[in-house]
Image: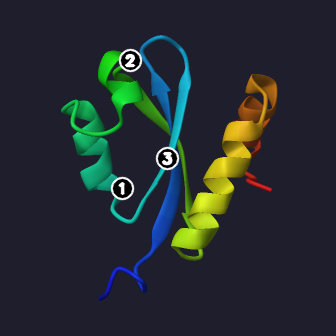
């Protein structure tokens, strides 16, 4: 399967300082392992992830990028509502 046709996901982690980290990937397990090993985003190197709060399947990389940008623009309380409700839009 080519990267263009593979499934993409938006994920949200709870970090050790209580903050959220939002990212996209086409391989959730591999990406989470990278975060745990300090080999992923600079943000999570100093704020180790504690848990995965939510993973949403996306319709391709472009949709995942748009969803990530939209999620990052939300306030903390709006993010919490999305995480509790399970709805992304």
Numbered disc 3: secondary structure: strand
Q: Which mark is residue 57?
A: none
Q: Where is residue 54 in the image (x, y as percent from the top left)?
A: 55, 44
Q: How far apart are marks 1 and 2 (CA)?
A: 19 Å
Circle 1 residues within 10 Å: few <14, some 14–19, many ≥20 = some
Circle nearer the N terminus (3, 2)? 3
Question: Where residue 58 sits in the image (x, y, percent)?
Answer: 58, 68
Which residue does the numbered mark 2 point to in the structure image?
47
Number of the front mark, 1 or 3:
3
Q: Residue at x 29, y 88 (%)?
A: 1
Closer to us: 51 or 38: 38
The answer to which of marks 1 and 3 sits earlier in the sequence is 3
Name the residue carrying label 1: 28
Separation of disc 3 and disc 2 at Cα?
Answer: 15 Å
Residue sticking out furthest to the top = 17
Q: Where is residue 12 in the image (x, y as percent from the top left)?
A: 53, 40
Is disc 2 placed on a helix, strand or loop?
loop
Secondary structure beneath label 1: helix
Left or right, residue 72 beside residue 15: right
Residue shown at 55%/65% (left/top)?
A: 57
Q: Does residue 32 lie above or below 89 as drawn?
A: above
Please give the name of the residue rendered at 42% of the width and 30% of the height, measured from the top-left corner: 51
Q: In this view, does 38 lie to the left or right of 49?
A: left
Residue at the disc numbered 3: 23
Given the current orientation, which residue lies at the most extreme front position? 42
Please indicate whether residue 43 sits to the left or right of residue 76 in the image: left
Dot in front, 1 or 2: 2
């Amino acid at each position: 399967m080519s990267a263009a046709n593979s499934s993409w996901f938006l994920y949200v982690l709870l970090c050790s300082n209580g903050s959220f980290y939002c990212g996209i990937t086409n391989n959730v397990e591999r990406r989470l392992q990278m975060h745990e090993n300090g080999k992923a985003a600079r943000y999570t190197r100093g704020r180790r992830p504690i848990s995965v709060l939510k993973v949403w399947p996306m319709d391709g990389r472009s949709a995942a990028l748009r969803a990530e940008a939209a999620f990052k623009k939300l306030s903390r309380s709006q993010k919490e509502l999305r995480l509790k409700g399970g709805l992304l839009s």
